[in-house]
């Protein structure tokens, strides 16, 4: 992984790039993170990474700045994820470029990000006052008051426990924190788990989630690790997980993985 990341500008002082520069986008093969957790082919999940980019701007044909919020959907089956700082720098590079229409700039961004991801990416450009940007709260039970014992070390799926009853429920925690694998900077999130299967022990689950606090991995990889661990050790008949990471650098990332092909990710949260 370290060799693959040598070309990144992470952790360095970077000038503002105001010249359109699609080469700034830095793809990272998903196969690297998936190999570490033994993800088989075909993939045992469906899903997408939902990004909100709050600082999308360009110039119209008269040179007047335009501002939108970009909602991206990157398929989970795409061969690459896109490193977030490179994504930010790329979007900044559009700031002084003129486009004849919103549709024209949308076409350019979709083309460039799709090329980096290795699959078709979908984009909505939303006005800052669009009601679709309103945050929501999660359905289900918050497990953050569970009486846990914090154990040092990496997330340990063998600590997960289940009961005898088979139920359908939704659980969530606001206590997820992971670290950027390059800079070591913290990334904060709420994680939501919707499943049908043997009852998840809430205390053990929260201990597992809190153990990500010093775990260095990209957002998408953390969610896939959680998904595989819970699927393997708890044996649910149905499982979906979504993490809602708070914004950093004008971007928030919301990876969603599900056992069901038709399942849809939830909208952004109040916290974001």
Image (cartoon, rainbow, N blue to C red):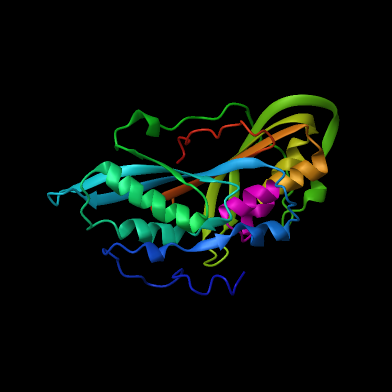
Question: Magenta includes 215?
Answer: yes
Q: On the rendered structure, is 198 left or right of 132?
A: right
Q: Does residue 161 appear in the picture of this structure?
A: yes
Seen from the viewer's position, the closer of residues 40 and 118 is 118
How far from the left and from the top, in percent, is residue 152? Answer: 72, 58
Q: Residue furthest left?
A: 62
How far from the left and from the top, in percent, is residue 142? Answer: 62, 32
Which residue is pictured at 39% across the width and 47% down the height? 53
Q: Does residue 153 appear in the picture of this structure?
A: no
Task: Tell me if residue 138 comes above or below residue 225 in the rendering.
Answer: above
**What is the number of callouts on the image?**
0
Which quarter of the image is occupied by the C terminus? top left
Q: On the rendered structure, is 7 left or right of 129?
A: right
How far from the left and from the top, in percent, is residue 170? Answer: 66, 29
How far from the left and from the top, in percent, is residue 222? Answer: 63, 52
Decide whether the magenta segment is chiefly helix, strand or loop. helix
Seen from the viewer's position, the closer of residues 84 and 29 is 29
Magenta region: 211-226
Which quarter of the image is occupied by the N terminus? bottom right
Which residue is pictured at 78% across the width and 49% down the height? 157
Seen from the viewer's position, the closer of residues 108 and 244 is 108
Question: Magenta includes 233?
Answer: no
């Amino acid at each position: 992984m370290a060799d693959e990341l040598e070309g990144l500008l992470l952790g360095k002082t970077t000038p503002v790039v105001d010249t359109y520069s699609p080469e700034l986008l830095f793809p990272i093969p998903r196969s690297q993170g998936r190999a570490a957790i033994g993800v088989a082919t075909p993939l045992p999940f469906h899903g997408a990474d939902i990004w909100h980019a709050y600082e999308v701007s360009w110039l119209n044909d008269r040179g007047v700045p335009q501002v939108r919020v970009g909602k991206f959907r990157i398929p989970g089956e795409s061969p690459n994820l896109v490193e977030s700082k490179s994504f930010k720098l790329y979007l900044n590079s559009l700031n002084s470029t003129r486009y004849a229409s919103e549709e024209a700039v949308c076409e350019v961004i979709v083309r460039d990000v799709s090329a980096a991801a290795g699959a078709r990416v979908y984009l909505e450009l939303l006005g800052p006052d669009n009601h679709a940007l309103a945050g929501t709260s999660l359905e289900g039970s918050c497990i953050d008051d569970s009486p846990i014992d914090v154990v040092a070390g990496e997330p340990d799926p063998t600590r997960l426990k289940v009961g005898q009853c088979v139920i359908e429920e939704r659980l969530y925690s606001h206590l997820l924190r992971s670290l950027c694998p390059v800079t070591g900077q913290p990334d904060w999130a709420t994680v939501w788990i919707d499943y049908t299967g043997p009852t998840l022990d809430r205390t053990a689950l929260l201990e597992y989630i809190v153990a990500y606090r010093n775990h260095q991995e990209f957002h998408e990889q953390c969610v896939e690790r959680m998904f595989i661990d819970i699927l393997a050790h708890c044996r649910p008949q149905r499982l979906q997980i979504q993490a809602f990471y708070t914004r950093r650098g004008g971007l928030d990332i919301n990876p969603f993985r599900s056992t069901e092909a038709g399942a849809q990710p939830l909208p952004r949260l109040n916290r974001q």
